[in-house]
Every structure is written in C-alpha cells, then in structure tokens.
Image (spheres, rainbow, N blue to C red):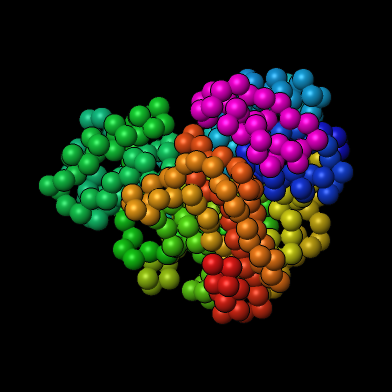
Amino acid sequence: MPIQKLLIANRGEIATRIIRSAHALGISTVAVYSDPDAAAPYVRLADEAVRLPGSTSAETYLRADLIIQAAQKTGADAIHPGYGFLSENAAFAEACGKEGLTFVGPSPAVIAAMGSKVEAKEMMMAAGVPTLPGATITEDADLAEIVAAVGFPLLIKAAFGGGGRGMRLVHDMSTFGEAVAQARDEAMSAFGDGTIFAERFVESPRHIEVQIIGDQHGNLVHLFERECSIQRRYQKVIEEAPSPTVSDQLRSELGAAAVAAGKAMGYVGAGTVEFVLDPLGAFYFLEVNTRLQVEHPVTELVTGLDLVELQLRIAEGEALPDEARHPRITGHAIEARVYAEDPAAGYVPAVGQLHRFRFTDADGVRVDAGVADGSVISPFYDAMLAKVIAHGRTRDRKRTRLKLRH
C-alpha cells in the first residue's frame, strides 16, 4: 500500500536525508523536534512538524508514545526511525504496527532477536555463518571454564549493547574477574541489562560490514561491503566502499555469508551484517544492525542506488527492482564524519552556536549535513554535524577529492 505521509522519528542529518528521498517519491513528511532543535534545517524542510516538549533524548526522541501520537495527530501512515534512538527498538516497531502505522524496517521479532548478541550469534551458528568462540558469563560462572572455552585474549561484551560500552579486553586471568564486574555494571547502567558474554579477541582485526536488503516477496541480496576499520573509542569515523583489502573471492564469500544470515532471519528492509576479518583473511560474525547505517552513502555512491528510497518502496510492498537485485560496483567512495569537538580538551563534544558552515561544491563530493549557519549545537545529542563523502573512479581519486574538501 502506498505511503501517503511519513513521520521521521529522528533528527539532524539523517532526518534531512530521509525527507529528501520521501519528497522525491511524492510522499509528504512530518518532522518531530525537541526544544533545542526547533530551528534545525530538517524541521523547515519537512511539510509538517510536531514539537516534542523537552531537551534530552529521554524526554523527546526516545518517547515512543509521543512519536506515535504525533503520527496520529498529523495523519501519517508510516514512520521511518532513521538510526539511533528508537530505530532498533522492537517494542516501538510493534507499537507502530498495533496502531496501524507502517514501520519502515524489519519485523519486531527480527529486531528483538538481533538486539541480543547472544541470540544473534546462536542463530548465525545454526545458519552456518562463521562465528568466534564465545560463552555467556552468568553471575555464578566458572571463569576458568570460560577461558577454557574461549581462550585469551578475549573480549567481554554487553549482550544488549553497543558503542563500546560494557566492553573489556582481557589478556590473562589476573584481571578477568575485575573486568567481568566492571563490564556487567556498565552494561546494566547503560542498557538496563547486565547480561555479558566473552568472545575470542582477534588481534589486528579489520571491521568489514555487508549491506543487505530484502523485500516482502522473498528476494534478498547483498550490496557489497564497507570497510570500517578506522575507529575511535570503538566508534567508526572513516568508512569506504569497496574495501581495499577485500579480494573478489573474499567479497563473494562475505556476501554469501551475509545473505545466509539475512535469510535465516527472514529479513525485510535494509540491514547490515558486520564481520571481523583477521590478518589471515578469515572472517567471523559480529552483529546485525537492523536499521540504516550512518555510513550508507558510500554504498549508495558505488552502486547508484538510493537506500532510503528502496526502504520506502519495500515498506509499500514493492519487490526489489532489477538494479538492486543485480547490483554492480562503480568506482570507490569514502566517508568522513564531521564532529563538533574541542581538541584542546581531548576532543570532547563542543557546544554553542555554529556561526558559519560551508562546504564548497565539487564534482564527486556529497555532503549530508544536519546543520546550517546559526545552528545551535546542544549538549543533549551526538556531536556529529555532517558527513562528507567522496566518490571517484579510483581509490586515489576519491581520497584526493576528500582531501580537497578539508
């Protein structure tokens, strides 16, 4: 069924990005905004806007009830969650369905299953996707048995978390117990669930992720890989496609594993299967992101596909078009995230008014921004201002284009 009016349950650059694709399809849009975001560019770009009273995420963009009320008030028939906030919240996706709203994303059951790294790993093992040795660390676990099963070095992870929170790298038994206690406390504080598990740590790894997309008619494909190894505090800062370290053979194997993962879930919509690649070329499942990724533009530029458009068309019940079912790589793309930070204070987020925001137009360079001259950078949300993405026929050419925008 065609979407007539779409509410975007997000803010900043991704809200702007979704609104533009929706408008290109002739879909009316509704923005929601917190008090600090009242004058944000995406609010002006939308056809309608609804205020969410308050400033913090908990008061606004994480209030599923207020967002659904905003959709009902404006007559929206679909909700796009973007990334972050409620995008991987199974209860929110389910609530949308109960209220007759189309949730632009996978089913609540898939979101819930992939929200647990333990359950996700078990599902991938059953599907034949390569996984690392691991074990859940219960309150009364015998740590020696965990080490026997996993080995050192090992990484402790939060079962329901991400972004590096609840993670601890352990090299020997002397620090294992303390690391377990710290990771469990941090996971409980950050995610409301203290479940943690241990997994074999890969030395000198590369972070490779594969974009998948599936429709409601049983079609599911991969749109190649992205290289996301340049990270800071376990968070990506530079991404590119295709990966310069992935051979054609490895690309085929990664794609096949990602498709197997998607089919095991019955995946519908756009998602990402993340892998860790060891120095010998072996890869292992990390997790599935059941949403649009921040770095999706590099995939768009090398395939010529609009992933947001595909999400919306799939949500309307359309089958994947031929160009998506038989994608090709054209050139190389690289993305750099632009943050408001204070280098003198150790690169902590900077707040205040943005007096001037300019990027010169250039062939092969795309800028996805959530700010403009005069925008106020508040302390309540992520400090990312924009993404600069360069595309060229060769990797060297796109790197040059990105440098020229610096």
Where is residue 342? Give x, y as percent: 40, 50
The residue shown at (49%, 34%) is: 380
Magenta span includes 290: no
Q: In this view of the protein, which residue sits in the foreground, 233 or 97?
A: 233
**Magenta-drawn segment:** 32-60
Residue lying at the far front of the rendered structure? 355
The residue shown at (75%, 41%) is: 45
Instruction: Indicate the quadrant containing the N terminus: top left, top right, bottom left or bottom right.
Output: top right
The residue shown at (30%, 50%) is: 155
- The answer to whether 396 is drawn above or below residue 263 in the figure is below
Residue lying at the far left of the rendered structure? 174
Q: In this view of the protein, which residue sits in the foreground, 113 or 94?
A: 94
Seen in the image, is 217 located left or right of residue 404? right
The residue shown at (51%, 28%) is: 56
Magenta span includes 53: yes
Seen in the image, is 335 located left or right of residue 314? left
Where is residue 328? Give x, y as percent: 71, 70
- The answer to whether 171 is drawn above or below residue 43 in the figure is below
